[in-house]
Image (cartoon, rainbow, N blue to C red):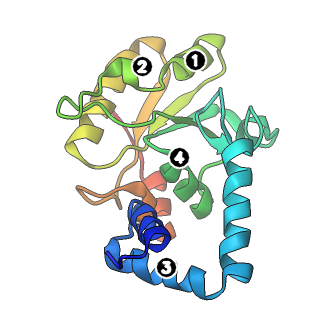
């Protein structure tokens, strides 16, 4: 790129982040390098701390510094209401919108023959364990409106219906091909409020 080893490596690493292409990565690298003491070094320190302190919640799949996570241990949460999402980013989007007061299950992806992701690759075991323990009234399938999201929702619906738990899916507001973590709070709120039985 620029012919300056460490700078090139920094730009290359930044360009691997979602939403950053080579040009955006160059701008970010310049901003960091112009103020290394106030921007780059604190960021590097926080990234190093997060790399060792952040863990995956064994109950829901969320990321937090404690296991179980703060959402799973919050006594004010409705444990009878589980919202199933694809990624932690989707969970964070719903939390930001403030419309779900239950708990979550992060699948870690969707079923995809092209990507080689099957049922064994999804984090569904904890969901079925919670249902078997009792007390779960409803499972909300808050999956992206994509072919893979619809396939995964259908697969989950077939396995959840025999349990007697009400299965719903987010409704209006999520456009076809849309991902939850990029929608605005109002659209997310409308989608969760307008969920319907499958």
Would you name the residue on which mark 2 appears?
A: 160
Label for residue 28? 3
**91 relative to 67 in the view: left or right:** left
Instruction: Tell whether 20 sits left or right of 112.
Output: right
- Residue shown at 73% from the left, 62% from the top: 45
Where disc 1 sits, the SS reads: helix
Q: Is residue 141 above or below residue 42?
A: above
Give the alpha-carbon distance from disc 4 to disc 2, as whole Å: 22 Å
How many badges with numbers are in the image? 4
**Upstream in sequence: badge 4 or badge 1:** 4
- Are there few (<14), some (14-19), or many (20+) residues within 10 Å of tag 1? some
Q: Which residue is mark 1?
A: 131
Front tag of 2 and 3: 3
User: Which residue sits furthest bottom?
Assistant: 34
Nearer-N-terminus badge (4/3): 3
First in sequence: mark 2 vs mark 1? 1
Mark 4 / mark 2, whichever is N-terminal: 4
Quarter holding the C terminus is top left
Q: Residue at x 53, y 31 (%)?
A: 138
Q: Which one is nearer the viewer's eye here, 189 or 2?
A: 2
* Residues packed near mark 3 inside 10 Å, few (<14), some (14 to 19) or many (20 plus): some
Q: Secondary structure at mark 3?
A: helix
Tell me which label, 2 or 3, sits earlier in the chain: 3
- Which residue is pictured at 28% across the width and 29% down the height? 154
Residue 74, image x and y in percent? 79, 41
Q: Position of residue 86 (x, y in %)?
A: 43, 41
- According to the picture, the residue beneath numbered tag 4 turns out to be 88
Asked whether residue 102 is in view, the answer is no
């Amino acid at each position: 790129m620029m012919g300056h080893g460490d700078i090139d490596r920094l730009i290359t690493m930044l360009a691997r982040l979602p939403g950053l292409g080579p040009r955006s990565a160059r701008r970010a690298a310049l901003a960091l390098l112009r103020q290394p003491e106030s921007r780059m070094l604190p960021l590097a320190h926080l990234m190093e701390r997060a790399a060792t302190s952040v863990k995956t919640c064994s109950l829901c799949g969320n990321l937090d510094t404690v296991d179980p996570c703060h959402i799973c241990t919050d006594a004010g949460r409705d444990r009878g209401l589980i919202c199933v999402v694809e990624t932690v980013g989707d969970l964070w989007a719903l939390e930001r919108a403030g419309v779900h007061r239950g708990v979550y299950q992060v699948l870690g992806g969707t079923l995809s023959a092209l990507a080689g992701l099957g049922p064994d690759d999804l984090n569904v075991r904890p969901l079925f364990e919670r249902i078997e323990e009792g007390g779960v009234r409803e499972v909300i399938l808050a999956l992206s409106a994509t072919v893979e999201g619809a396939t995964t929702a259908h697969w989950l619906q077939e396995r959840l219906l025999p349990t007697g738990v009400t299965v719903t899916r987010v409704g209006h507001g999520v456009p076809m091909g849309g991902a939850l973590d990029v929608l605005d709070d109002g659209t997310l709120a409308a989608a969760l409020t307008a969920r319907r039985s499958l």
